[in-house]
Image: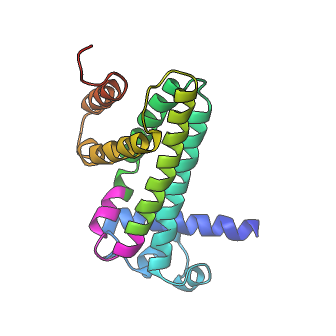
C-alpha cells in the first residue's frame, strides 16, 4: 500500500509538471508517462484518465495548502495573530500555486463543474476557519463584530478578489506592500477614529 501511494505521488508530480508546461488541453497521457519515465499502461493502473489525474493534482495541491494554513494558524496564540497569519500565509500559498491557478483559470470551461465544486468546497472550509478565529477574538473581547459569519464570508471574498492582482504582481516588494495594505484595512478599517 505504501509503495502504491509513492508511485501515485510520483505520477501526480510528473503530471503537475506536464500540466504547467502544456496546459490540460494539450497534454496527453503519453506526455505524463514520458515525464515519469514509465509506460502509459503503468499510469492507467493508478488513474483511469487524464481528467482523473488532473483532479487528483488539484486536490493534492489544495489539500497541502489547507493543511499548512491550519498548522500556521494553530501556532499562534491570539485571534489577531491567527487572523494575520491566515491572511499572509493564504496569499503566499496562492502566489506559490501560481501555475496551478493558471491551469484552473485556463481549464475552467473544460473542467467547469469540477473547478466550481472544488472552489466552493475550499471557500467553505476557509470561511469555517476564519469564523473560528473571529469567534475566538469576540469571546476574548478583542474583536467587535455583529455577525462573525458574515464577517468571515466578507474576509474570504476580499481575499479571493485579491488573488488575480497578487498573481500578476511580478515583484515581491509590491506583493508584500499589497498584503500589508490588506492587513491594515482588515484590522484598522478606513474610518478615522
Most extreme residue toward the right is 1
Report the quarter where the N terminus lies.
Answer: bottom right
**Looking at the image, which residue is at 37% across and 40% down?**
155
Where is residue 169 drawn, in percent x and y? 23, 40
**Looking at the image, which residue is at 57% across and 31% down?**
136
User: Which quadrant of the view contains residue 101?
Assistant: bottom left
Q: Is residue 114 magenta?
A: yes
Q: In the drawing, does residue 89 fall left or right of residue 25?
A: right
**Looking at the image, which residue is at 50% across and 77% down?**
52
Q: Is residue 65 visible?
A: no
As drawn, 40 above or below 184: below
Q: Nearer the viewer, residue 140 or 165?
A: 140
Where is residue 188 drawn, in percent x and y? 33, 21
As drawn, 177 above or below 54: above
Q: In the drawing, does residue 30 fall left or right of residue 36?
A: left
Q: What secondary structure predominates along the stretch shown in magenta?
A: helix
**Looking at the image, which residue is at 40% across and 46% down?**
153
Q: Nearer the viewer, residue 73 or 136?
A: 136
Report the quarter where the C terminus lies.
Answer: top left
Most extreme residue toward the top is 193
Where is residue 11 drawn, in percent x and y? 55, 69
Q: Is residue 148 magenta?
A: no
Where is residue 131 drawn, in percent x and y? 50, 41
Q: How many circles with numbers are drawn on the protein?
A: 0
Q: Is residue 18 visible?
A: yes
Q: Which residues are magenta?
A: 101-115
Most extreme residue toward the front is 146
The type of colouring in the image is rainbow
Amino acid at each position: 500500500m505504501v509503495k502504491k501511494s509513492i508511485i501515485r505521488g510520483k505520477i501526480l508530480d510528473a503530471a503537475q509538471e506536464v500540466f504547467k508546461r502544456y496546459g490540460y488541453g494539450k497534454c496527453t497521457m503519453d506526455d505524463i508517462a514520458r515525464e515519469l519515465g514509465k509506460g502509459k499502461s503503468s499510469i492507467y493502473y493508478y488513474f483511469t484518465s487524464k481528467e482523473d489525474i488532473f483532479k487528483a493534482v488539484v486536490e493534492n495541491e489544495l489539500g497541502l495548502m489547507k493543511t499548512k494554513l491550519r498548522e500556521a494558524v494553530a501556532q499562534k496564540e491570539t485571534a489577531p495573530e491567527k487572523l494575520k497569519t491566515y491572511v499572509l500565509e493564504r496569499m503566499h500559498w496562492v502566489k506559490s500555486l501560481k501555475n496551478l491557478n493558471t491551469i484552473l483559470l485556463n481549464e475552467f470551461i473544460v473542467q467547469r463543474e469540477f473547478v466550481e465544486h472544488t472552489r466552493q468546497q475550499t471557500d467553505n472550509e476557509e470561511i469555517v476557519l476564519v469564523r473560528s478565529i473571529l469567534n475566538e477574538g469576540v469571546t476574548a473581547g478583542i474583536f467587535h463584530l455583529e455577525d462573525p459569519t458574515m464577517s468571515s464570508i466578507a474576509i474570504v471574498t476580499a481575499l479571493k478578489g485579491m488573488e488575480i492582482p497578487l498573481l500578476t504582481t511580478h515583484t515581491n516588494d509590491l506583493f508584500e506592500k499589497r498584503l500589508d495594505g490588506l492587513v491594515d484595512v482588515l484590522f484598522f478599517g478606513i474610518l478615522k477614529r
